[in-house]
Amino acid sequence: MSFFRHIFLVICVLLCSAPGARAQRQLSDSLQQKLAHTANPQKRVQLLLDLKDINEDSNLNLVYSIQLFREAAAIGDTYAMAVAAVPVVAQYAPYPEKEDSLRHYISKLRELTPGTPEEGMDAFAEMSDGFYRLRSEYDKEKALRLAHAISKWCDDDAAHPDNVFHRVKRLLLKGHAGVTIGYYEKGIRYAFVPQTELWEEAFELTRRMPGTVVRHNFSSLVYYVLSGAYNQSKSYDKQVKLTADYIDLLDSYYAAEDRLGRRPWLYRDNSYVNPFRQLIRCTLNIGRDDLTEKHFEEFRQRMLNAEGENLLRNKTYLYELGYLWKGIRGNYDRSVLYCDSLITMIGQGKGYFRMNPAKIYQVHRDRSLMLARAGRSEESYAAYERTWEVQDSIFNAGQHERSETIRLRHDMDRRQLAETHALIRNRMAALISFIAFGVLLLGTGVYLALALRRNRRLQADIARHARKAQESEQMKSIFVNTICRGIGPPLEAIDRTAHALMTAEAPAADRMQLLEDIRGNTDVLLSKLDNMLEAASLDSLTERLRLEPVDIDRLCRTELLTMYRLRQGQDIECTIETPEEACIVPTHPKYFTLVVRAMLDNAGKFTSKGRITLSYETDSGANELRVQVTDTGCGVPPERREELFGPLSGPSSESRGLSLALCRMIAGHLAGSIRLDTGYTQGARFIFTIPLRP
């Protein structure tokens, strides 16, 4: 029996709510039909403005706002653009995929509003975008990244024009980002409080804004955050003064804004709901029920002063705030009474809840919770059952409404399609006459384009081959010069020593020394030839070198020891400086060794007395291994620094290393570099770097 009674109640609710909802839907449909048959741009903008205001409490508000902004921008109606931008930015901001669309809206406002009463709406749109994006980000890491990015952007003076609109924007967003950083990063529970001074300055600056529409939009958002800060700090006196100032701003806005005559369906009392909510929250925070009662009564009187449909909307807010407040204070029986009043309005099709299914479900759910807390178990159980029935009925009604909307749109699309077909038929004759001519032009253009493209490709190939030939000749010249300079001196030394050996009548010990000299120069010559062949092979290499882990310490010590043995007997001290930990780096061991060897040999060539130091270090931040060879020799004169890595520079005939030009080529193949440290003046220092990680 109880089941049928609940079904009967659901049917009654739906039947009772139909007339009010139908009346507003009929008005909206009537204006939509009129819009479909209106071509005048100014009249279309006015119709869209009316449709937006009528559907303020429905999902169609965003649809009409988008269309209103587009058509208003086409005729330069900046007031309509400003009105439409507010809901679009608020609903688009939380979605990253809408960023390009938001940039378009902001750029249009920036382009068209300067010099108009709506100047500064671009700054408001940017402020709202950052505010709603940050407020809607619930992932801690993403929220912190976004907050730091917004804070850094606000501190960049070059990124913002210097006027009152952008100053308020930066102050609000700087504080809003500070809330997120303070809450997540610093563990501040009442994170609004430290930002109070920023927002107080922003609220004062809004008073200097000349345009009433822009001032109204800025002050609403600044009031929201500043009143929240006062609530957290329990600053009741400041909250009262702030709310009074804000209500005065609202009163002056609705009294002085002459263009509000364009909006007969604008719901003005909606603006006064949030100030009284903030006042009541503050009194609840400080535990003053008498003040809560006082402000609730003020809110009640203001809401009851309206007439007609607005009075019904106001009662909706009144009953909603009443049952929430009474529930918070533990007066569950009184809270249930407010819920009953609100449910009665919904059942009669009155108030804005009838257009918001989520709110209808919420009030039924809250009523069941209040009954349970009041100890009225049987009524609470029945209310829970009623909540599920309402949820099902809302779902079915929503499905029906969506189906009806789709059907209506389908009918409209079908009529538009018929009109389009008629237009196509009328233009088909003219179109056919141009097809043949168009095809001829297209074919000619394609032929010319292909011919031009082919000629350009041939010219590019010729130029590329010429560059390759020039580079090949240059590298060949470098290689030949290097061979001449590299193997000539060792051969001369061998010839000179051999001649001395054959002609000199010397003891056996001296002859053995001459033979040792011949063998040493032969080793140098073979090393030179081997290194040059490796460099030539590297120059012709087309694939990337295969890298393998290399013990840098072992390799450097081996080369330094070899160099020391070759220079034994000279007044040169050879040292090595290495980090304490092991250094294993992926590189090509052979080519890495060639470069280190050339650097050491080059240092030995120009250092007759003093010290040669081989050192290396790693830099994880720069992702590089730096190998340095420092000597106390004669250094490199400034006039020779430019030609140092040229084809004719390189080690002496006594060394086994490559020329510096070939060393630079090897460094390039290893994804590194080699250079002279011009800041070192006690001799010469060469620095060779390769990546720590490929």
Image (spheres, rainbow, N blue to C red):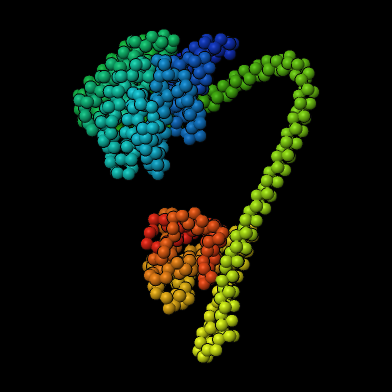
Q: Position of residue 174 (x, y in %)?
A: 33, 34
Q: Nearer the viewer, residue 161 or 488?
A: 488
Q: Is residue 385 left or right of residue 39?
A: left
Q: Is residue 509 left or right of residue 319?
A: right
Q: Is residue 664 above or below residue 190?
A: below
Q: Residue at x 31, y 22 (%)?
A: 206
Q: Is residue 181 above or below residue 205?
A: below
Q: Residue at x 51, y 66 (%)?
A: 651
Q: Nearer the viewer, residue 673 or 498?
A: 498
Q: Is residue 414 visible?
A: yes
Q: Nearer the viewer, residue 550 or 533?
A: 533
Q: Is residue 584 above or below residue 196?
A: below
Q: Position of residue 336 (x, y in %)?
A: 32, 26
Q: Please identify the quarter of the rendering in which residue 264 is found.
A: top left
Q: Residue at x 38, y 9 (%)?
A: 258
Q: Position of residue 438 (x, y in %)?
A: 76, 24
Labels in figure, total = 0
